[in-house]
Amino acid sequence: MQWLMRPVPALPIIGSFADRLLLADLPDLPPSDRRLAVDFVAHRVDNLPSFTRFGVMVLGFVFRGLLAVPGGFGVAKVLVKLPLPLVAEYPRLIRSLAFAYVWETWPNTTATGAKVAATA
Amino acid sequence: MSMQRATATMDADVLIVGTGAGGATTAAILAEAGLDVLLVEEGDWVEQGAVVPFSLDQMDRQYRSGGVTVALGMPSIAYTEGCCAGGGTEVNSGLYWRPPGELLARWREQFDISDFDPDDLLAIADEVEADISVSTVPGGHTSPSEVLRRGADALGWRNGEIPRWMKYPPSKLASEPRSAVGERQSMTRTYLPRAMKAGARLALRCRVDRLVTNAGSARSAVTTLGDGSRGEITFRDVFVCGGAIQSPALLQRSGIRGHIGRTLAVHPTVKLAARFADALNVPDDVPVHQVKEFAPHLSFGGSASNPGLVALALLDQWATFKHAITQWRNISVYYAAITSEGRGRVRSLPGLKDPLVTYGLTHRDRELLRSGLGRLALLMLEAGATDVYPSFKGAPVVRNRRDLATMQGAFTAARASVMTVHLCSTVPMGEIEGKCGADSFGRVHGCRNIYVNDASLLPTAPGVNPQASVMAVAIRNARRFLDAGGCRG
Amino acid sequence: MPAASWMRVAAVGDQLDRGTIERWALPNTTVVTGAVGWLGRALLHRLLGDPQRARLRLLAQNTSEAAELQRFVDDHAMNAREQPVVEIVVGDVAKANTAARLLHQLGHDTDVVHTAGVIHPRRVREFYEVNSNGTRHLAVAAADRGVRRFVHISSNSPFGTNADTGDTFRGDEPFNPYLGYGKSKMAGELAIGEAAAAGLDATIVRPPWFYGPFQPPRQTTFFRLIRGGKFPVIGSGDQRRSMVFVDNLVDGILCAELTPAARGKGYWIADQRAYTVAEIVDTVGRALVDEGLAVKPPATHLPPVASRIAEIGDRILQGIGVYQQQLHVLGEMGHTIAVDISRATAEIGYVPKVALHEGMRRSIRWCLDHGLEL
């Protein structure tokens, strides 16, 4: 089973969904910063323990598939609100990694992702 | 010092797998007794000061899997493990709690541990405290730490500063206050240099995949080196000190059966972010105060609170909490930790590098998490918090007592961000069959020369920061190994 | 004047002397709601025994309750040389205009002790009508009249149950109400808080499970279950329960009434320490034997899941407005409810004088003396 987990990099699988999710959560985050955040998320997913990584990659495939069809992101958003614990964990993982990265890297980011001048 | 690259074949009297609080102390005791000791560490040696404490960079370089590890369950419990020379001691809060004497006595009774005199262990604790400079902060405390003291004092709840194993450099001028920023006396500063000075060798970036065993004896270990190549280490005795997740996983991968990995014990914690009128955030340190009024079953303390971690604390109810993020300088994150009646499992699955970790909270655990979060929120209000943001889905912002009731009514553990940093008890020590994975001195039941000497041995989670307990037990067992003529059999 | 009553009043004075706790003199008028109830009668018994209480004004819910109260007062008068002037006002505490009539022409030389409450209603909404709205009406009216002290009798229920058998509620705890009763009593406490913010001098007394003389006939079930070895012990019975002997509770109420420093505070009033359920069953059994009654050894042990199921059932029924007492009691039996009285001792000088065994003996004797079959 190891061949399934190691060689496949996470970015192509989870990148587009993570990007859409961050665009929805933080619309004012500059696109270049969003890309950095998505890269960071993918890097962390690459380092997940085997079992978790496997689960994340499977969900990543499903959600990437959803994004490929029109209106798929809306379906995905509904899907994660259903009481399916592991499914809801997927966007949560992406969000936690991305938010931690965004605010640690650019602490003066607003709730919508805009940059503000540092306040004392 | 003898820090070396791991090579394809190595040999030693004693192989020690892991360099944390258990492995480093074991290495120092055995090397100083003249044994030929080889320490292997999966991670790197990271000098203190090379990374910002509690940063993502630190998580990348010193934590296993970048700090993103989880015990699956309802809810899943996020946990972290150090993966570097010094293990968890390099990345934890540095707070030091002796194991309570009555707890040691209870362990002895309930797990039938031979020669386990609480006084002996506390005497070892005395030595450890001198070795790693356990001390209190010389000057004043940080504002987030003062919040805990102030809130607890207002409620009449027992609280205090927990000493840390830190050295505080003396001020350059007599008129200057002493620095409150200490130098951690972690394993890379204390027991690892001691071990190497006594001749122990340390091989970094060397993962032990499995032990080759035959009829309860192990003679060699199969390793993967940093460049991905395979290696082999031969030895007479082996100490597995990879922590409560990795140690049982390695034993299982080596085909060792018995009570291994079945009783993972943790201190589950829930957290909240508290906002105050004035700026208080300290991004790179944690509060030294803890509230022990309800110990052992319930403790409160402060978490790391850099802006990224504040965002994480607000994440569960982002829709209504998100606007607080721009106020992160006025926010600090706090936790409520419980002793858990639930248990978890560590299972190695064939073909997978990492074990599957699961944990189940009991009904009582869930209720206790609710009660803990409620009391913690009350403490924050008493300390002057203007807004409290509990970390669970559906949480209200708490500004007064009525909100507290709403919060407790809305809480369920399944909706909360439950996490833990204290992992124990996967190879409990003692003589009771079916309950203990190792004997009274850490030798794996049914094995002749395989020892465990880390947090896995603690029979239960101690209800306090466990590093002191781990070190005292590890030193006791290493000495016992020497007394029993270890390595000469 | 029965000597015993004098001694008890003097005991409050003793506490005053031991510490630096400042006390008020007795008020001209003492208003009591719920006087016909279990706690109400125990309190009234004490107040009637103190002729320095110039005037008592009691609230009765209806004319038959008023008659019952009058009989209680008259019975007491037969044994006393002198006792306070007693007025009985008839009215439903849940109705907005009752409070104004109850407090008519009273002012700052008045203390109010609000014991009226519903514990085991037929319908869940009665909880709110009495425990929440009734309390609010009364507190608002008392604030208007500028009474000296308003003592509100609350409960452990606004704070729920202890999550661990080793846990004990401290002086100040976050609300975490246990079902309908807890929610309604919490709303009552919050109403007191609002009135206090508007100037009412109020103190909250929080008793857990109480026992002792003046118990209503339904409470004999408790003794009968223990006598028959049928009291439902959940698991090993290691749940801890705080209880309070009703005379201790009256002591606590008087301390809360007469201590100026109690303003704006809430106090647990209970026996000195919490007891385990197993200890309660054992002690009550011994008390019954000591009073000459035969007792079968406890035999009814239920698994913890039984209590959990009862609690869930109770929750569901209360969700549709139905209250079922047995289910409620069984659901609660699996929990620890333990409180720490040290703040009451330190701040208002409350020292419980009777512990479980003696309290239960007195309680059993009272039942036998009053013709109740155990």
Image (tube, coloured by chain):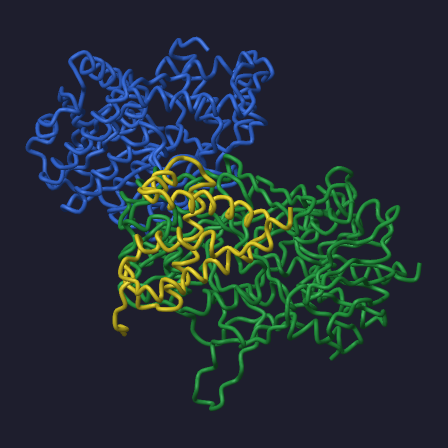
Give the image quarter of residue B469: bottom right
Work out whether residue B369 can be spotted: yes
Q: Which chain shows up in green?
A: B
Q: Residue C91 in the image: state x and y as whole percent.
A: 13, 21
Q: Residue C161 in the image: state x and y as whole percent.
A: 42, 35
Residue B236 higher or lower than C364, as above or below: below
Q: Is residue B266 left or right of residue C90?
A: right
Work out whether residue C17 can be spotted: no
Residue sitting at the far front: A69
- Identified at 56% across, 11% down, the residue is C294
- Chain A colour is yellow
Q: Is residue B416 left or right of residue C83?
A: right
Viewer-proximal residue, B182 or B246? Answer: B246
Q: Which chain shows up in blue?
A: C
Residue sitting at the far right: B489
Q: Residue B131 in the image: state x and y as whole percent.
A: 67, 72
- Identified at 59% across, 27% down, the residue is C236
Q: Residue B287 in the image: state x and y as whole percent.
A: 45, 64
Give the image quarter of residue C190: top left
Residue B115 higher or lower than B41, as above or below: above
Residue sitting at the far bottom: B173
Viewer-proximal residue, A6 or B116? Answer: A6
Quadrant (top left/top right/bottom left/bottom right) for the N terminus of chain B? bottom right
Give the image quarter of residue B477: bottom right
Residue C221 higher or lower than C125, as above or below: above
Q: Is residue B207 left or right of residue A43?
A: right
- Identified at 84% across, 48% down, the residue is B447
Quadrant (top left/top right/bottom left/bottom right) for the C terminus of chain B? bottom right
- Identified at 14% across, 46% down, the residue is C199
